[in-house]
Amino acid sequence: MPEIFPSDSVGLVEPRTLHFPDPLKLACGRELPAYDLVVETYGTLNQDASNAVLICHALSGHHHAAGYHSEEDQKPGWWDNCIGPGKPIDTNKFFVVCLNNLGGCHGSTGPSSINPETGRPYGPDFPVITVRDWTNVQARLADRLGIDQWAAVAGGSLGGMQALDWAITYPDRLRHALVIAATPKLTAQNIAFNEVARRAITSDPDFHGGRYQEHGTAPQRGLMLARMVGHITYLSDVSMGEKFGRELRDHAYKYGFDVEFQVESYLRYQGEKFSENFDANTYLLMTRALDYFNPAREYGNDLSQAMAQAKCRFLVMSFSSDWRFAPEHSQKLVNAMVDARRDVSYSEIDSPWGHDAFLLPNERYIRLFRAYMNRIAGEFTDAR
């Protein structure tokens, strides 16, 4: 009987919902009385729970990082290139945990969930969430799963920021942090891109002040535009040129303002697809969490002092054509780690694919990633 899935796939996976009944105090000063988290796990937790790896997702990510939910799935989870048997995060060695963050729209409690105080969707009443809030929630999840210390916390982009916050906030609860295509704080330009995206959403007539669910509609046009703006920043000029160039759909100018270039068609398709599967209020929350992230702020804006709180080892990777979180951002972070005398390995990967490169197969990236994870696996393998 032929195998349905590739031999290096985790195969069929099933998410589960965990309920947390205890109140959660948030950085904004508000409190959630209780919440749910949707979680997927891959691999097997070893006897002393020393092989657990936490995967933190980026802005539009979720709990489904690897494998398939059904035999009919056309695509695997969003980081399937890196998670599975024999892959960098080898599920024959590691127990891998990925969750949909609080405030998300893929099953965890968020703006589209019912507010127990009103019986209506939270909508704009859902509290603003920070990366620190996610770190605290993930620590509670670790407690629930019986994991006192992660072998590693890993993520790309906004996920990398969470890995960094873990190292600072819970220094005794992880041995390694993998910070990939990330930054210790957003530049003014990045905050500006996020604001344009938010304004596209809130200016949509179907936004209704964030209460669109109660009106039986959704600000799909605004969310589509927000995604189009964001998607441009995730790609490089080279990658867009190689993929589309200035190709016309019908090989001739039409002298109008409808879609004529292939790149226009691609962006509209991506925007439309995203607007059908993502919640607008969640998009507002996630981009604001990005804006607020700045761990140095608690330490007199001294990033080296912030990094001095960490005890784990670090792998930091950046990509040459990533202009959203350019390599110099990672280099600044690495310099702060060195100043704080932390153990850090750094590599800038040559890639033409821009910010999205951390999601794509790249021989050098995969080789370095696998080598570092094998080093981690050797720690608990040798200890047995």
Image (cartoon, rainbow, N blue to C red):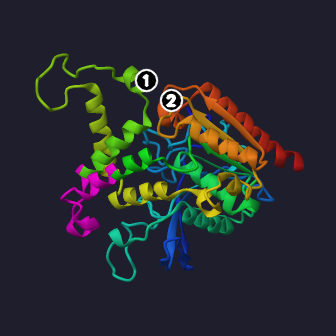
Q: Amino acid at mark 2?
A: Ser
Label 1: element kind: helix
In percent of the image, x 63 and y 61: which residue is there?
300
Q: Quadrant of residue 72?
A: top left
For the N terminus, the quadrant is: top right
Q: Is residue 51 magenta?
A: no
Q: Is residue 172 positioned above or below 354 on the image?
A: below
Q: Please tell me whether residue 218 belongs to the stretch shown in magenta.
A: yes
Q: Provide the residue designation for mark 1.
A: 238
Q: From the viewer's perspective, is residue 383 above or below residue 23?
A: above
Front-most of 258 and 27? 27
Give the percent coordinates (x, y) of residue 110.
42, 66
Q: Is residue 304 left or right of residue 105?
A: right
Q: Amino acid at mark 1?
A: Val
Residue pictured at 61% horizontal, 67% vertical: 136
Give the main secondary structure of the magenta stretch.
helix
- In the rendered image, the vertical position of residue 364 relative to residue 33, given as above or below: above
State which region is magenta. Answer: 196-221
Residue 369: percent from the left, percent from the top?
A: 67, 36
Cβ atoms at labels 2 and 1 below 8 Å apart: yes
Residue matched to label 2: 321
Q: Residue furthest top?
A: 251
Residue extending farthest to the bottom is 117
335 horizontally vs 19: left or right: right
Q: Earlier in the sequence, mark 2 or mark 1?
A: 1
